[in-house]
Structures are given as C-alpha cells and as structure tokens.
C-alpha cells in the first residue's frame, strides 16, 4: 500500500509496509499515483500530456518511470503486507509479563471538570484514596510478574494524586528500597492539576519523577470554563505560576503540559500559543473523550477546523525552529530511522496484558480508561488476574483484529488505535473510533512532514 499527500511544499509518498518515505518531484508523484493501474507506455503517455508545460523528453520521462520501478523492485514501493501472521507474536512471547502499572492513588479530586472521563475523579464510584498497604502490594505484584524485565514503570494517577501525596512519597521510598534486591529499576511519573504543588512537591518530583504531566487547557477563558473547583471558580491563575516554577526547577525538561480541546475550542492552536507565551515548550493537546451528546463532544463541523489546526501547528513548529525557539508536540514525535519494531507496531499498546491500572482498593483493570467498567475487572493485586478470558480478549487486540484497519494507510503507525476509545465508541474493544482515526491520520501526515522539513531544511 502507498499513501501520497502534499503538505508544507513537499510531495510525500509513504510505502506503508516497508516503512520507506519518499520526497519526490511532481512527475514522480504523478507516476506513482497511476503506476499500479497502467502499463509503462500508458503511464508515459499520460505524463507527457499532464506535464507538457515542462517540455520533458521521452528519455526523461522514461528515466523517472524506471526509477519508480526500481524502488518497487527494491521493496521500497508497493511492498506487500507480510505481517499478519506475526500479529500476536509479541503478546504471546510476553504473556504473563507486566511492565507498567497506573496507580490510581486517589479517586477524588479538588477540581470539578465537566468533561472529565473519570467522572470528576471518582470513576463513577466511591471517592477514596489508596492506602500504603494497597500500593505496596501493587508494587510487589509488579515486581513478581515482571519476568526478566529490568525497567518498570509506575504512573501516579487520579483523580488528583497530590491529594494523597504522603502515600506517593512512601511508595516511591519503598520501591527504591527493594528495586536493587530484585534487579529492577523503577521509573515514576505523576499527573497533576497543579493546585497542590508547593516546594516540597517540586523538590520530590525533580528527584524521583522521570516525567510530570501538568494539566492546562491553554487560554485562560477556555481553561476556566472547564477546569473549575466545586464552587465554580476557575483554576488558571492559581496553577500557572506553580507550573512555571516547577518547569523552571526541572530545567525545562521531562514534563508535559497536557491540554484538552473540546467543542468549545477546536481552534486549539490558540491554546498552544498561550502555553508557548507562558514559557512552556513540551506540549500536548488531546481531543476530548466524552459521552455521545455531551456538550463538549467534538462535532463533524469541528473536525475540519481541527484538521486545519494540525496543519497550522506543523507550520508553527517549523517557524519556531527557524527562530531558535523549538518546542515539542507529543503527537508529532516520530522517529523515521529507529522507531518501534514491527512486532510492537502491529500488536498495540499492551493494555490489559503488560500494562494495567490499579484502583485504590487494589482491583486490576486493563487501563485507566476502563476503571469503573465492572465487566473489565481483571482481578486484584493479591490474587493477580482471575479472569483470564478478559485478558485473552485484550491479547487478541492488534491492528489485524479490526477489519476497518485493513485498508488504512496509517495502521502501522497507530497499531489499531485505542481499545478504550473503540469500546466507548462502538461497544467493542476491537471496534474503531472513526472520528479519532481521522484526527490520527492528519496528525501523522503533519508529523512526517515536520520530520522531513527538519531533515531537508529549506531545500524543498
């Protein structure tokens, strides 16, 4: 399969199954578009007519055609998909091995965000905080089920995890005590709305957290429309100075400013610009995840705006590069030379298998977006996975398990997409969240163009 598009002044041709990316001139671009449908003579005749203004000789036309044919012979164009038989190999090889846990250290929150997928932090259940004993058992469970993996990941999540900060500190201290004994290395991350950040939090985060995710929706009027306390007061002015202090203390590294855009701000580039104006450089803006019919839900009318915003964002990134003020956008991070192996690219994210979420009571769920969905409860941190049939269903999640993915050019970039989004959209973890697919494809086109532009500089 080949995907072609024009963006940023480049003619881009992706050979999906080989992973080859070609930047070509107009003639080669047009030859590729009809190469498989017509014979050589018909292609050359069509190109001679289409590019008559260039006065190309038959020799020049033939040479370009032959170069395209040569790329096909080398397996860099129109390469076949030979990966389907490998789709379950990685998960079969790592079956029973857990590498990461999302600890729901707090099922309560000091904000009352209307679009919150976690129902304002309690996940449609009781408000609670995780005890040290439950958290310790979760870490013991991770160590015991991590096989030969040395590097283990733990996310402190909520609700608002800083509402249970002492237990966070105690669990990190416990992990540091036992990791060397078991030949492990823990990597911790923290997601926070920022209200409870103080000097103690900053010092601890800089010492122990490999990454910190900070929730900010960009413009004050947008942020304060949604991210309010229980009295209805906005939080922008309270948290921005704290975020700035924390980021400065971290040397401007190892954090993400994470925003959410909704029906209220499909023009999210203005929010990105606000984050940049505040001095933040590691950015992410995520489309809202909410129930059908929710006032925050992105509409079809919003989609055209969002797709255009992604293109304008790519242009802004390149402009800032030239100004010596680069920034990172999470969804545009792509490595064209050393990305994930094909096994990872076709097997999916690992939710429910190598990655799980732990509730304050120690229950195991496939990931944080399934918490509260009782039918997806896998077991608990004392007894492990007691419903292997649920885990087996997630084991079967891969890019080839979704018929809608078979003809999608982006399938080896998204690995079949998010199982939680698929479930909430279609009722099946092997379904497809079509709206999200449209956004993902545009993000990938933009990400690849930015990587090409950075490699080529101004030479198009």
Image (cartoon, helix red, strand yellow):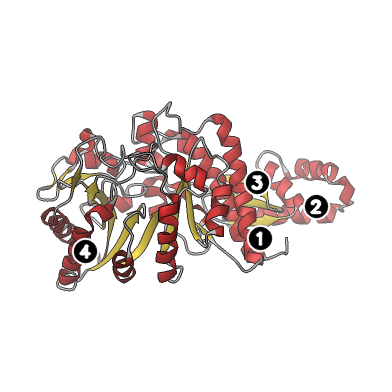
Q: Is residue 109 left or right of residue 347?
A: left
The image shows residue 44 at horizontal and vertical percentages of 79, 45
The tag earlier along the polypeptide, 1 or 3, is 3
Q: Disc 2 marks which residue?
A: 61
The image shows residue 124 at horizontal and vertical percentages of 25, 35
Q: Disc 4 marks which residue?
A: 169
Give the CA separation, mark 3 to mark 2. 21 Å
Q: The C terminus lies in which quarter of the figure?
A: bottom right
Q: Compare residues 151 and 286 and report the one nearer the observer.
A: 286
Q: Are marks 1 and 2 in contact (CB under 8 Å)?
A: no
The tag earlier along the polypeptide, 1 or 2, is 2
Give the CA separation, mark 2 to mark 4. 67 Å
User: Based on the displayed image, in which of its 4 quarters is residue 179 positioned?
Assistant: bottom left
The tag earlier along the polypeptide, 3 or 2, is 3
* Label 1 neighbour load within 10 Å: few <14, some 14-19, many 20+: few
Q: Is residue 191 left or right of residue 314?
A: left
Q: The N terminus lies in which quarter of the figure?
A: top right
Q: Disc 1 marks which residue?
A: 319
Q: Disc 3 marks which residue?
A: 5
The tag earlier along the polypeptide, 4 or 1, is 4
Give the CA separation, mark 3 to mark 4. 49 Å
């Amino acid at each position: 399969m080949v995907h072609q598009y024009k963006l940023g002044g480049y003619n881009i041709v992706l050979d999906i199954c080989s992973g080859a990316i070609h930047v070509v001139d107009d003639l080669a671009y047009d030859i590729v578009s009809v190469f498989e449908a017509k014979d050589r003579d018909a292609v050359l005749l069509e190109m001679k007519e289409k590019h008559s203004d260039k006065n190309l000789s038959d020799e020049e036309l033939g040479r370009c055609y032959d170069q395209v044919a040569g790329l096909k012979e080398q397996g860099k164009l129109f390469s076949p998909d030979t990966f389907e038989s490998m789709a379950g190999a990685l998960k079969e090889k790592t079956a029973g091995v857990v590498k990461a846990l999302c600890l729901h250290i707090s099922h309560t929150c000091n904000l009352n965000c209307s679009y919150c997928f976690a129902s304002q932090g309690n996940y449609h259940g009781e408000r609670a905080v995780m005890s040290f004993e439950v958290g310790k058992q979760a870490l013991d469970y991770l160590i015991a089920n991590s096989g030969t993996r040395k590097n283990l990941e733990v996310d402190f999540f909520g609700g608002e995890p800083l509402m249970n900060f002492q237990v966070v500190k105690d669990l990190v201290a416990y992990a540091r005590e036992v990791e060397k004994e078991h030949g492990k290395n823990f990597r911790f991350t923290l997601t926070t709305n920022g209200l409870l950040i103080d000097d103690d939090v900053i010092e601890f985060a800089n010492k122990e957290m490999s990454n910190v995710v900070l929730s900010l929706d960009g413009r004050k009027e947008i942020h304060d429309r949604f991210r309010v306390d229980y009295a209805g007061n906005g939080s922008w002015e309270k948290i921005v100075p704290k975020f700035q202090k924390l980021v400065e203390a971290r040397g401007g590294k190892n954090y993400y400013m994470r925003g959410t855009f909704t029906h209220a701000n499909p023009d999210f580039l203005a929010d990105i610009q606000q984050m940049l104006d505040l001095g933040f450089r590691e950015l992410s803006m995520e489309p809202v995840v909410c129930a059908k019919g929710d006032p925050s839900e992105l509409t079809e009318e919003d989609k055209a705006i969002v797709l255009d915003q992604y293109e304008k964002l790519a242009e802004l990134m390149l402009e800032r590069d030239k100004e010596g003020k680069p920034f990172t956008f999470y969804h545009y991070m792509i490595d064209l030379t050393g990305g994930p192996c094909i096994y990872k690219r076709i097997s999916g994210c690992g939710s429910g298998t190598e990655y799980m979420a732990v509730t304050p009571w120690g229950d195991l769920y496939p990931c944080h977006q399934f918490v509260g969905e009782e039918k997806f409860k896998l077991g608990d941190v004392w007894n492990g996975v007691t419903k292997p049939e649920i885990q087996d269903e997630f084991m079967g999640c891969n890019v080839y398990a979704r018929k809608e993915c078979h003809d999608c050019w982006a399938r080896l970039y998204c690995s079949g997409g998010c199982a939680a989004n698929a479930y909430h959209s279609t009722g099946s973890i092997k379904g497809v969240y079509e709206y999200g697919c449209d956004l993902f494809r545009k993000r990938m086109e933009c990400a690849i163009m930015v990587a090409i532009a950075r490699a080529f500089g101004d030479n198009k």
